[in-house]
Each structure stands twice: as structure tokens, then as C-alpha cells.
Image: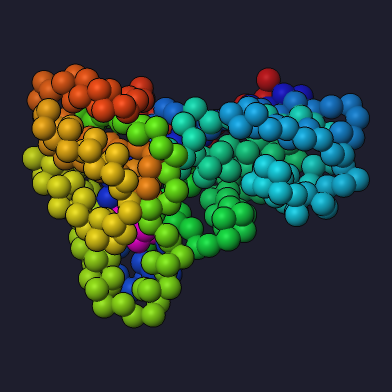
Amino acid sequence: MIIEATAPTRIDLAGGTIDIWPLYLFHPGAVTVNFAISLQARCRIETRTDARIIIESRDRAIAFETDLRQIEELAHEPRLELLSKLVHFFRPETGFHLIAESLSPPGAGLGASSSLAIACIGALNHLVGGRYHPDQFIQIATNIETTVIRVPAGVQDYYAAFYGGANCLHFRPDGIVREELKVDAAELERRLLLCYTGEPHVSGINNWEVFKRHIDGDARLFDLFEGIRDSARQMRAALLANDWTAVRETMRAYYPKRKQLAPNITTPHMDQLVEKALAHGAEAAKVCGAGGGGCIVFLCGEGRKERVAEALREGGASLLAWRFSAEGLTVREL
């Protein structure tokens, strides 16, 4: 049996970091806005007739072997830790070869590890006969990835990977509610430019430090979170109205709030790229994910996208080709 699963990555537009439990509970009306893109994470599982287990990451060029008798040891396996813990959780009863890969560059800040977790969960769950309902996939991914990164994690990436499309996550006391945003996908693709800086991100926002400061009652940090919440709500309204003037103004207001939350969200090279892009027709910029490297998404003025792209290439950045992904997790048996 061969199983193939894919899940998209995402571009986050507003409301990052506020998606960490329980921080959003202190900011009534908290939301996060993102949309899925075609730079997929992929998982392929091919069953074997023996008891061997092979776990392989194509993009990291790492692979190792074990067998069903040692499956308990995968809970503490440092090699390909996320994949190992997922296999340990599902405990398949047949040998197999699992191959994982991501089309996103390393450390891009596009939620690739979370997308990979969702793709692997979809494939492994199919392998074990659908033991878990798909409604449980996001919770499984959140819990297992948290044990890998060992700090509180935001949840927005899993929703984009699982559902695809454009998403507004509403964080409420009775749970997280996903709202599918009806956006003009063609306009998103036409106006937004995704730039990879060439610097793998090193988490410019240290979620654990932010978490501790928030819980300790840092008043300035609390006010910044209020501003992040408000910007995300404004982004939602702007996208639903297809109001690109409002999108531009919201992105411009959001950028300094993220810088205040963590000044090292941008590196000197990233600052130079933003300055260069703005000088050549970009209207606003948004660092993807936790920053400290990785990707920047630019909103380009009418007819100026190619000028901005050329300026970024001259600055040493790469432009990533992407499409809006309406489809989330897909699992098929070949």
C-alpha cells in the first residue's frame, strides 16, 4: 500500500503570537488572519512486508531505520524528532517507509513544520485504519509539536494546513472557531510578493519570553497585544471588503507593532530589503512567522510588482513562486 498526503503552508497577515494559549484569553475579540499557499508539505508512506521502519526527510537529507519492536524508543529519538514522535504516537503494526519533504525553504517562517505534522498525521492515521477522527488532527499536531519545540506554540499554522483557504481564527473561551474568509484569491496573488531572505529564521520573537512577560503582567506588552488584536480584526474586515487601501494601511500599522514586540524580528539584511522594496513601489511589508530571517511578504503598488521583485533580487533575496491554496490536507491511497 502507498499513501500520499499533502498540506499547504501559509502566509500570516495579522494576529501572530496572540494565537498562543492562553494569551488570547486575556484579549477579548482576539483573532488571527492567514491564508494557505501552494508550497506544500508532503508525506509518502509505502508499507513493507517485513517489520522494518524507515523514516526519511528528503529536504534535510536525513534517514534512519528501526523496526516495530523498537517503536517505543521513537518517543525519545533525537533524529527527525517530530516524525519519530508522530510514528510513536500512532504505533503502526506493519513495517513501512515514510518519506517527508517540504517545498518551503528551510526556516522560511511559513509554518512548514506544522504543515508537515498535519500531512504526516493524515498519512499515518490512514495507515492505522482511521483510528482518529479528522477533527482531532489539529489537537494531536499541536500537542506533539509542542513536545518537540518545548515551548508554548501558536496554533494558526495547523488550521491553514488542515483547511486551506483564507482563515480568520476567533479565539473564544468556549474554543477556537475557524471562519473561512471569502477573499479574492486572484487579487492576493496579483498584489502580494513573497521574498525569501536567504537567512533561515531563528525565531526573532521568542515565544517563551513573550509568554512569561505577558503572564507576569507586563503592561506595555499587554498594550502591544491589544494593538495586534485590533490590526488583525481590521485585516479581516479589509479582506472581506476587498478594500486594498485598508489592507495597505493595516499592514503599515501592524509592522511597527511587531517590531516593538521583538526588535530582532528583522535582521539588518531584512531591514535593508524592506527599505529597498518600499523605495521601488512596495506599499507595505509583513515579516512571516516569528521573523529573525525567513520570508517577508510585500504588498505592491499597481503595476510595480516586477520593479519591486527586481530590487529585491538585487538585494540578494529570492522570490518564491506561490499560488493561493483553496485545498487543505489531502490524503489518498495509490
Q: Residue furthest bottom?
A: 217
- Can residue 228 be seen in this snapshot? no
Q: Is residue 93 above or below residue 186?
A: below
Q: Position of residue 181 (x, y in %)?
A: 29, 42
**Relative to the observer, which residue lies in front, 330 or 250?**
250
Q: Residue at x 19, y 28 (%)?
A: 191
Instruction: Assess whether residue 17 is covered by the magenta stretch.
Output: yes
How many marks overall?
0
The N terminus lies in quadrant = top right
Left/right placement of residue 290 relative to residue 162 reads left
- The magenta stretch spans residue 141: no
For the point 86% across and 33% down, the residue is: 52
Identity of the residue drawn at 61% across and 54% down: 148
Asked whether, in this view, residue 104 is left or right of residue 133, the answer is left
Tell me the quarter of the image containing the C terminus.
top right
Question: What residue sits 42% from the left and 60% below the top?
Answer: 206
Q: Which residues are magenta?
A: 15-19
Q: Is residue 68 above or below residue 75?
A: above
Give the camera-side residue of 273 and 150: 273
Q: Mainly helix, strand or loop, the magenta region?
A: loop
Res 148 visible: yes
Residue at the far front: name it. 268
Q: Nearer the viewer, residue 127 or 321?
A: 321
* Place of residue 124 in the rendered image (x, y in percent of width and height, measured from the top left): 69, 39
Q: Is residue 274 left or right of residue 118?
A: left
- Tell me residue 322's x, y (percent): 36, 25
Q: Position of residue 97 (x, y in %)?
A: 76, 29
